[in-house]
Image (spheres, helix red, strand yellow):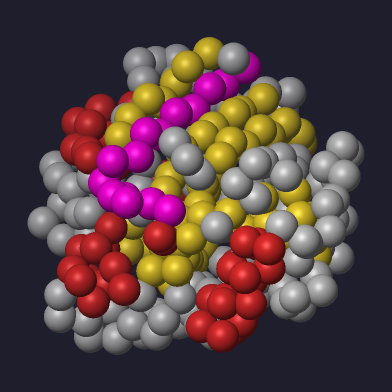
Amino acid sequence: MKLLRVGTAGSERPALLDAEGILRDLSGVVPDIDGALLADDVALGRVRAAAESGELPVLDADGLRVGPPLARIGKIVCIGLNYHDHARETGAEPPAEPVIFFKAADTVVGPDDTVLVPRGSVKTDWEVELAVVIGRTARYLESHEEALARVAGYAVAHDVSEREFQIERGGTWDKGKNCETFNPLGPWLVTADEVSDPQDLSLKLWVNGEPKQDGTTAEQIFPVAEVVRYVSQFMTLYPGDVINTGTPAGVALGQPEPKPYLRAGDVVELEIGGLGRQRQEFKPA
């Protein structure tokens, strides 16, 4: 299923994109799309039955804002330097273990919402990423099979980053990762049964129409199953938590000087095969 949330910010309602690409209203079936729904097999069964019935009300998509596909996100765990080609372009050694940092849930916006360039920023960068949405509690997992069984679905994430804040301003990476609007998510939460192999997904990104990133999850140093298993050794993952699994080559940081960092007025578009497409205009904070 392709689950999404539509409406004005803060007042989104649950919806579903059916097999014919028709937008359908789910608000009469479930109150929202969140961790509680993803952990509830009975509720998910009602959604599937409603989708298959073809009787869900049709929504007019014209002019209708698409919000983040997941409400009440618990935490966003991010994996750094997780693509072989991205490590090469930045001159970094591939890590021996996954590099973990966090984004606050309040950085999440809709896939086509405005992204704000922070005040004083000169190195705002783009990063298309595969987001993994957790649907079952995960702690001390022992196998990749257990890990994938905890995944509810997948989505497109844009891990917008401010490189000066991240690298040159001291401390951890968090200052360059948690600026407002720095995690557009969606348009859809695609349930795991529709993604036969999370290591066979194409990722693409354009800036002002110019191709910048063109990669595949096959380049991941630590595949999705290992990322989920590994993270569960250090923290408990709960339904509604999100893991951003890293970005392929092509970010501004990895390009020759003068690096083409983002400025107000730029437009970024990104997509992952089968998971949908995003478009953001960048404006000053």
Q: Position of residue 223 (x, y in %)?
A: 22, 54
- Residue 141 appears in view: yes
Q: Position of residue 259 (x, y in %)?
A: 45, 20
- The residue shown at (35%, 48%) is 246
Residue range highlighted in magenta: 194-208
Residue 104, picture quadrant: bottom right
Q: Position of residue 281 (x, y in %)?
A: 72, 31
Q: Nearer the viewer, residue 171 or 174?
A: 174
Depicted 67 relative to depicted 243: above or below: above
- The residue shown at (73%, 77%) is 30
- Count the marks: 0
Q: Is residue 96 magenta?
A: no
- Residue 179 appears in view: no
Depicted 47 relative to depicted 8: above or below: below
Q: Position of residue 177 (x, y in %)?
A: 51, 53
Residue that lies at the very extreme toward the left in this rendered image? 96
**Which quarter of the figure is the C terminus placed in?**
top right
Q: Nearer the viewer, residue 40 or 85?
A: 40
In the visual, does 37 lie left or right of 214? right
Depicted 205 relative to depicted 182: above or below: above
Q: Nearer the viewer, residue 93 or 132?
A: 132
- The residue shown at (66%, 33%) is 279
In the visual, does 37 lie left or right of 285? left
Q: Nearer the viewer, residue 239 or 104?
A: 239
In the visual, does 84 lie left or right of 7? left
Depicted 211 relative to depicted 160: above or below: above
- The residue shown at (29%, 68%) is 148
**Which quarter of the figure is the N terminus placed in?**
bottom right
